[in-house]
Image (tube, rainbow, N blue to C red):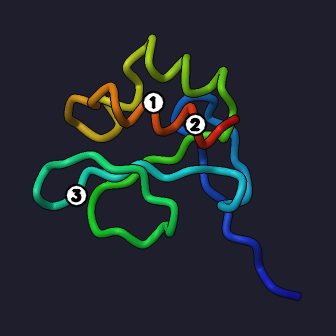
Amino acid sequence: MKKIPMRKCVVTQVRLPKKELVRIVRTTNHTVEVDLTGKLNGRGAYLQKKKETVELAMKSKILSRALECEIPQEVYEELLKICD
């Protein structure tokens, strides 16, 4: 039986299979990107693929604290597109 990789959502603190989450990365050149492959280099944080979770992350700035940088509005817009 193959082991399923689990990750924790930075907003809800719920552990879920990696495929049910989306990864946001602060790359080595200090840009923030949505990582759909899960393999980009840099500091990563995971979010549930739910519209409510993304909106809560926007409102509370949890993602900014997790990645230790400001998150551009375009990243949140891209996340909302992925969630719907």
Q: Position of residue 80 (x, y in %)?
A: 56, 31
Above or below for 80 versus 48: above
Tag count in the figure? 3
Q: Which mark is residue 77?
A: 1
Secondary structure, mark 1, is: helix
- Which circle, 3 or 2, is nearer the viewer? 2
Is 36 positioned to the left or the right of 6 in the image? left
Above or below for 1 versus 9: below
Secondary structure, mark 3, is: loop
Is 45 positioned to the left or the right of 17 in the image? left
Which residue is labeled 2 in the image?
81
Callout 2, which amino acid? Lys
Q: Position of residue 32 (x, y in %)?
A: 27, 46
Q: How many angstroms separate mark 1 from mark 2 (CA)? A: 6 Å
Callout 1, which amino acid? Glu
Alpha-carbon neighbours of circle 3 within 10 Å: few (<14), some, or many (≥20)?
some
Q: Are marks 1 and 2 in contact (CB under 8 Å)?
A: yes
For image coordinates 51% across by 37% down, the residue present is 79
- Which circle, 3 or 1, is nearer the viewer? 1
Above or below for 6 versus 74: below
Which residue is labeled 3 in the image?
27
- Residue 81 picture quarter: top right
For image coordinates 44% across by 47% down, the residue present is 45
